[in-house]
Image: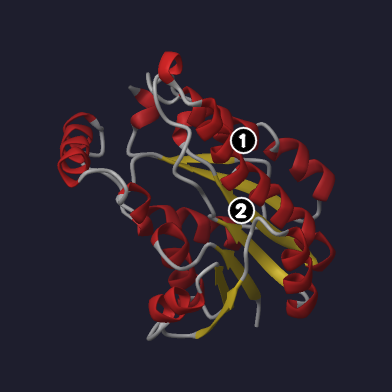
Amino acid sequence: METAIVMGGSSGIGLAVARRLAARGMRVIATGRDAAKLEKALTGVPGTVSTAAVDATDRAALDDFFAKTGAVEHLVITVSGGEGGGTFAELDLSALRRGFEAKLWPHLEILQAALPYLSRGGSATLVTAISARIANPGTAGLAAINGALESMIGTLARELAPARVNAVSPGVIDTPWWNDKPADFRESLFAAQAAILPAGRVGQPDDVAQVIDMLTANGFVTGTVIPCDGGLHLL
């Protein structure tokens, strides 16, 4: 039985990935900071699923976690933060710095800590965002965070071969990432996106999870960033 670790598996995309990989017959370990939230989210998910409370910003905790977990075939990193958005003239650079600390550094710390245990021919899949590749006003900071990750994918794939390294770049996805925004703003944004996106709707966590599932299964895809954005990058 293959082992998959989903970092950030208590909600949204990470939770959808944990469900999909468990349904495929993998042994899934889902992590997050809040043990109770993890346990509640994963309760009743069919398959071999366990949880572990891990702070993805704590390198010592990550090293200890992977040492205890041992060999892993698939690593999925979905951890993220909510800061870094806004027009550049008004952008709070302290908030942008916190955005980097919440997403860029945890992705790199997790991947580096996992390397001694990632199997040959295994996979590591990062979750970035389509802000990295569209010139959308108000997203320069988010583009910087996610673009930094995306720019590394090809080099990582060559350096870490035969393990495969890929990323999925979501667009507007209806996840708890939006929960700190006012409900009327969120609903208005989703409606506006649905009206202009070629797909005719905003995304759901499982849309992204399907792509990640494919990347764990397909042994011939590496060094690739796949948009999953309903066509937002075409606009």
Total numbered labels: 2
**What residue did someone put label 1 on?**
150
Residue 131 in which image quadrant: top left
Confirm or deny contact between disc 2 and disc 1 (CB under 8 A).
no
Q: In the rendered view of the protein, which quadrant contains the C terminus? A: top left
Q: Residue at x 55, y 72 (%)?
A: 30
In this rendering, would 158 be left or right of 233?
right
Give, as a three-letter code, the residue at label 1.
Answer: Glu
Q: Residue at x 51, y 34 (%)?
A: 95
Q: Is residue 221 visible?
A: no
Q: Position of residue 142 (x, y in %)?
A: 49, 31
Q: Residue at x 70, y 36 (%)?
A: 152
Above or below: residue 56 compared with residue 156: below
Q: Position of residue 87 (x, y in %)?
A: 40, 19
Residue 181 in which image quadrant: top left
Q: Which mark is residue 133?
A: none
Q: Nearer the viewer, residue 121 or 73?
A: 73
For disc 1, the neighbor class at 10 Å (few under 14, some 14 to 19, many from 20) is many
Q: In the rendered view of the protein, which quadrant contains the N terminus? A: bottom right
CA–CA distance in space, label 2 to label 1? 11 Å
Q: Position of residue 73 (x, y in %)?
A: 70, 69
Q: Nearer the viewer, residue 141 or 199?
A: 141
Q: Is residue 150 visible?
A: yes
Tell me the element at label 1.
helix
Q: First in sequence: mark 2 or mark 1? A: 2
In this rendering, would 87 be left or right of 57?
left
Above or below: residue 43 compared with residue 86: below
In this rendering, would 57 be left or right of 49?
right
Above or below: residue 151 compared with residue 107: above
Give, as a three-letter code, the residue at label 2.
Answer: Thr
Q: Which mark is residue 125?
A: 2
Above or below: residue 204 compared with residue 182: below
